[in-house]
Image (spheres, grey):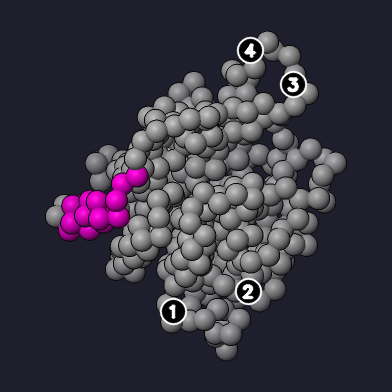
């Protein structure tokens, strides 16, 4: 029998940290550990609570501290081999550039290291970071070997340089993404509000895997009458688990993993909503739920045989060569595609 010690997957999670609540590393660590991962946690900031509250306090780690911990400590001295690196919020341009350089080298030197990148820039039309970070992320995602990227709608718009309001916009957005960032093998846009479905009370989660298909797939998810913090961080963590932890004999398609992850996340959000609605009556206006109830949802996270949220719809995109990944010196798959 194979020892559990040798089969347990190891991930380095580089994200924000809050003492109270569940966003960033707090939203990722427990779900990953509960589903069998050995998680090394590097906190880029330490706040009392997330900024969605009226007040918070805390501090940001310096670039030098972050670099020293990873480069000199985890990799340089301990020689730890990771199966995945999950990166999220970084506090400034310099930290983003330095940490991306380190993680990028790890992935180039070892094909077994998979980088799951959440390009945290902002949400709902508002930047959380310096504006210069947009161009830095664009450069990182153009030249780095990235297993999966998980932007939200606002971040996707910033990265591809266009507004996404309709399904046709989304198609052009994915085409632009693949053209600009051909070394990003998979992308999931974690929330899309599209006018095509404005009367259906749904939002859209869409994904694309350039290693398998020239089709974008998307799920229509019924809205819950609430807004949540940390759900995107939870999706990124659970996708890391579903795609890389070996719950199935072979790596399953991104569309299958995303369907299962969305079932888990929507079930957790629904239970979180129910636990927050004290009076039991439906609300006319969306309520603001500041924190996920992850501990109360541990039985949901425990499931091995996870159902899918439903069957995805698809559309083809242009300018895609299935399975083609250019070298770091390439300039986009359309101009650099094989004959």
- State the mark number for residue 283: 3
Q: Which residue is mark 1?
A: 327
Q: Which residue is mark 4?
A: 278
Which callout, 4 or 2, points to the residue nearer the camera?
4
Along the horizontal axis of the image, is 50 left or right of 47?
A: right
Assign a secondary structure to mark 2: loop
Q: Which residue is mark 2?
A: 320
3 or 2: tag closer to the N-terminus: 3
Along the horizontal axis of the image, is 127 left or right of 164?
A: left
Q: Quadrant of the C terminus?
A: bottom right
Assign a secondary structure to mark 4: loop
Q: Quadrant of the N terminus?
A: top left
Residue at the left extreme of this rendering: 77
At x 64% / y 33%, what residue is drawn? 227
Where does the magenta region start and end? 60-76
Spatial distance from mark 4 to mark 2, Cα to Cα?
Answer: 50 Å
Which callout, 3 or 2, points to the residue nearer the camera?
3
Establish if 264 lies above or below 109.
Answer: above
**Residue 9: x %, y % from top left:** 33, 46
Q: Which residue occupies the foreground of this view, 329 or 326?
A: 329
Along the horizontal axis of the image, is 228 left or right of 148?
A: right
Is mark 4 in CB contact (under 8 Å) with mark 3? no
For mark 4, does the 10 Å Cα neighbourhood hold few (<14), some (14 to 19), or many (20 or more) residues?
few
3 or 1: tag closer to the N-terminus: 3
Q: Is residue 256 visible?
A: no
4 or 3: tag closer to the N-terminus: 4
């Amino acid at each position: 029998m194979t020892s559990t010690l040798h089969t347990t997957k190891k991930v380095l999670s580089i994200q924000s940290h809050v003492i109270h609540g569940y966003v960033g590393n707090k939203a990722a660590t427990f779900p990953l550990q509960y589903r069998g991962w050995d998680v090394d946690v590097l906190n880029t900031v330490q706040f009392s609570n997330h900024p969605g509250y009226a007040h918070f306090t805390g501090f940001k780690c310096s670039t030098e501290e972050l670099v020293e911990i990873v480069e000199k400590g985890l990799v340089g001295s301990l020689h730890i081999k990771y199966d995945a690196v999950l990166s999220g919020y970084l506090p400034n341009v310099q930290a983003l550039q330095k940490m991306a350089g380190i993680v990028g080298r790890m992935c180039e030197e070892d094909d077994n290291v998979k980088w799951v990148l959440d390009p945290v820039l902002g949400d709902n039309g508002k930047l959380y970071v310096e504006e210069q970070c947009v161009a830095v992320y664009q450069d990182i995602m153009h030249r780095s070997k990235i297993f999966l990227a998980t932007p939200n709608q606002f971040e996707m718009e910033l990265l591809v340089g266009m507004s996404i309001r309709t399904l046709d916009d989304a198609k052009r957005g994915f085409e632009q993404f693949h053209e600009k960032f051909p070394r990003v093998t998979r992308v999931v846009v974690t929330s899309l509000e599209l006018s095509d479905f404005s009367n259906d009370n749904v939002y859209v989660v869409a994904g694309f895997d350039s290693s398998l298909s020239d089709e974008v797939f998307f799920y229509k998810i019924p809205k819950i009458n609430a807004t949540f913090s940390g759900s995107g961080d939870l999706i990124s963590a659970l996708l890391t688990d579903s795609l890389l932890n070996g719950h199935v004999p072979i790596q399953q398609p991104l569309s299958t993993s995303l369907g299962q992850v969305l079932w888990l996340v929507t079930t957790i959000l629904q239970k979180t909503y129910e636990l927050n609605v004290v009076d039991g009556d439906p609300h006319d206006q969306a309520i603001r739920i500041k924190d996920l109830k992850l501990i109360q949802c541990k039985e949901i996270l425990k499931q091995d045989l996870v159902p899918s949220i439903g069957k995805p719809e698809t559309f083809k995109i242009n300018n895609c060569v299935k399975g083609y990944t250019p070298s770091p010196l390439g300039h986009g798959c359309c101009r650099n595609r094989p004959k």
